[in-house]
Amino acid sequence: MAKAKRIGILTAGGDSPGLNAAIRGVGKTAIGHYGMELIGFRDGITGLVANRHTQLDGKALSGILTIGGTILGTSRDKVHKMEVDGEVKDMIPAVVENYEKEKLEGLILIGGGGTAKNAKRLMDAGLNVLTLPKTIDNDIHGTDTSFGFATAIEIATEAIDRLHSTAHSHHRIILTEVMGHRAGWLTLASGLAGGADVILIPEIPYAVDKVAETIKARMARGSSFSVVAVAEGARDVDDMADYEAAQLLKKSAKTPEAKGAAKAHLANVEDAQREHTFTLARQLEAATGLEARVTILGYVQRGGIPCAADRLLGTRIGSAAAELVAEGHWGHMVAARGDGTEPVPLEDVAGKVKLVPQDHAWIESARWVGVGLGD
């Protein structure tokens, strides 16, 4: 197949360490090895719709490997539901028009689950697209890992390490809320690496009394403190049942009115559960007699210099993407597979989420070393 001469690239969704490494991996391979022309769209889907772009050449790609975030900017817009002048519009036709106007032969979208869905919609509209898996949550279906995850583990682990000393000094329970959306990969990994005494993840709804039992058992053995790693999506058994019921109601709604009501109900449930870590802290204080304090790690987990593993992953996935472009291999996500890569059809990725299996080796290891999982 003839190789593409002019391709576009963008970053979308939440920022994460390793995005610039991936842009660089694509660019240096596409330009230097295959002689392609590469343009970068500003601010994700927003820039693609507005046709805001910049030429990416050797100078633009120089020195970005160690920089966090993304030199192109990002956004969370949905290409088929964008707010324009106060109205929600389908902007896929505008993207197709810009794609043709710029004489693109393909488009690479770097992002997570939402980006995969946007890419699938553009593919269905007849565009040549590839995606690269990015998220600190590690919840993208079809890939072993995503860039951003390794750096976020390092950041969260260091935070848990530091909280051990203050928990020990003050004889407290320290609850550390870790990102991850509805997947527990980041909390499980950093909790294990940081030596957390309890790890609570969305895949295993917890019972407060079970968490308290773990802490009281530590107290009986002479430990006057405990560190609890809590995923932002973790919930106790009752709250998880309410959330899942609201999700099911939303999925089953048929009419516009029913869909609107179900969406509003789900939002109310999520709002009521938003400060669940603080609620748990109060419950554990009452159950154990120890003071409990909460630390929300938040966006610090996304920032800063990418670790070596993410630089390596972004580089090899990015360079593999350029190779697929040269081969005319479109409609796929470039997945990490062992030490290599593998193209996975977008229809097998879009709309799916990779959660922590109940029998995963990390969960088994946690149980073996005596970590409480709240069940």
Image (cartoon, grey):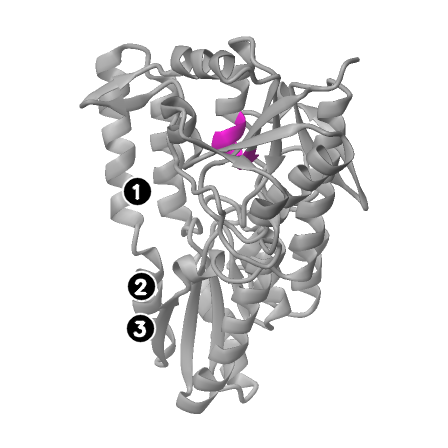
Q: Is residue 200 above or below residue 327?
A: below
* Mark 3, other Cα within 10 Å: few <14 / some 14–19 / many ≥20: few
Judge by depth and name the residue closer to the eye, 343 or 234: 343
Q: Is residue 174 left or right of residue 338?
A: left
Q: Is residue 122 left or right of residue 141?
A: left
Q: What amino acid is at disc 1?
A: Glu
Judge by depth and name the residue closer to the eye, 217 or 335: 335
Residue bearing the label numbered 2: 278
- The residue depicted at 47 percent of the width and 13 percent of the height is 101
- Judged from the image, the secondary structure of the residue bearing numbered disc 3 is helix
Please identify, in this view, whether the residue under mark 3 or under mark 2 is nearer the observer.
2
Is residue 359 something one can see in this rendering? no
Q: Quadrant of residue 127?
A: top right
Q: Distance between the Cα atoms at labels 2 and 1?
A: 15 Å
Q: Distance between the Cα atoms at labels 3 and 2?
A: 13 Å
Please tell me whether residue 31 belongs to the stretch shown in magenta: no
Residue bearing the label numbered 1: 270
**Range drawn in magenta:** 110-116
- Residue 203: percent from left, percent from top: 53, 46
Residue bearing the label numbered 3: 286
Quarter placement of the N terminus: top right
Q: What amino acid is at disc 3?
A: Ala
- Residue 342: percent from left, percent from top: 77, 32
Please tell me whether residue 113 belongs to the stretch shown in magenta: yes
